[in-house]
Image (cartoon, rainbow, N blue to C red):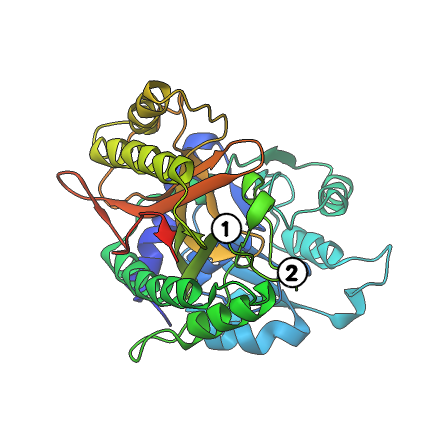
Amino acid sequence: MLFTKEEYKLRLKKVQTSMQKKGIELLISQDTNNINYLTGYDAWSFYYSQCAIVHVNAEEPLCFVRAQDAGGAYIKTYLKRENIIVYNEKYIHTWPTHPYDALIELIKKNKWDNLNIGVEMDSHYFTAYCYEKLKQGLPNAKIKDSERLVNWARLVKSDAEINLMKGAALISQEGMKVAIENIKPGVRQCDAVAEIQRALFRGTPEIGGEYASIATLLPTGKGTSASHLTATDEKFVEGEATIIELSGVNKRYHCPMARTVLLGKPDQKKIDAMKATNEALDAGIAATKPGNTAHDVAQKFWDVLDKHNIKKESRTGYSIGIGYPPDWGEHTLNIYKGDMTVLQTNVCFHMIAVMQFGEWGVEASESVRVTENGSELFCNFSRDLHIK
């Protein structure tokens, strides 16, 4: 059990309070991150149906998993054994039967089939088939979107969660150090990423790493004008820049970081673009404190870009914490103009500045924690353009 039972109970109570406000009597949470948050469950089983189930008056959630994964649930969760609900393997890939047939039977058995039921309509692993199963199998229930209720409960971290993220940050630094060492002219991109992945898994002598919820991103050359490109077997070329975006992982908690490397002679336009990028990041970070909004941070960031006549339409940050594929963002707070989410102590976000100029770009980012009086950075690693 990763956290104390008291912490899990506080999480449950926070979620149940939000359920009451939204008129939800039974919550079915399919988001892998939320299942982990509510129960402690952690396994690579999210490719098939599983969920956490929370009754508004329950003392514990239920963890609904397939029989093959029951052992992992017994080991990883803090739940009593009777609250781990196991469905039969006969439901696996035998359409039209489906694991949600077993879920519907469970709901009916507990006489919950006429309740107001919240589901995570935009969760990556809640399919249209799952939704149709619930609608057809529970005609007397009122099924509604929970509006990322658990995601929002995760927004403010506990001190124990912050400590795990600080460990993840140390691993991020190790990974980035190895990335900059291995990106050289003539080296294949895939070989550099092999060394990066090795560093991220090795972690530090005190903390071992894990798989990240996003692959190491490595746009290079013209690719720096695009986003979310991964490594190929092509070689790095002198005179070209490469963007590295990665994250260390500590017990599923992430601390992402992005930096840019330039191979060869200094390029003044890239140096100037990186200086403006860092100036904008610094302005946003300086505005990060309790009581300010995500909009306030974004406004300070864009004020600098406007001064330098740099256009950027995408958001420049999002909340972070627990992460499973395909994303390490929490799908709540955005550092973007118009997001009026009020910052609180121990809100954490990845503030990322992707600057693209036609056929080239630069990028830098920081993982940021809101403190009692301002903010602090999780990582300590130069954001300057790394020229080799």
Can residue 305 be spotted in the picture?
Answer: yes
Residue 132 position within the rendered picture, expressed as x and y whole percent measured from the top left: 76, 41
Dot 2 and dot 1 residues touching (CB under 8 Å)? no
Q: Label 2 sits on what residue type?
A: Thr
Q: Secondary structure at mark 2?
A: loop
Eye-nearest disc, 2 or 1: 1
Can residue 289 be spotted in the picture?
Answer: no
Identify the residue shown where x is 78% and y is 41%: 136
Identify the residue shown where x is 24% and y is 37%: 344
Q: Secondary structure at mark 1?
A: loop
If the image is split into quadrants, where does the C terminus sit?
A: bottom left
If the image is split into quadrants, where does the N terminus sit?
A: bottom left
Few, some or many residues within 10 Å of mark 1 (<14, 14–19, 20+): some
Q: Label 1 sits on what residue type?
A: Gly
Q: Is residue 258 above or below residue 290?
A: below
Disc 2/disc 1 C-alpha distance (Å): 18 Å
Q: Is residue 326 left or right of residue 282?
A: right
Identify the residue shown where x is 87% and y is 54%: 96
Identify the residue shown where x is 46% and y is 31%: 315
Q: Is residue 185 left or right of residue 275?
A: right
Residue under label 1: 239
Residue 259 position within the rendered picture, expressed as x and y whole percent measured from the top left: 40, 51
Few, some or many residues within 10 Å of mark 2 (<14, 14–19, 20+): some
Q: Nearer the viewer, residue 38 or 163?
A: 163
Residue 43 position within the rendered picture, expressed as x and y whole percent measured from the top left: 55, 69
N-terminal of the pair, mark 2 or mark 1, is 2
Residue under label 2: 232
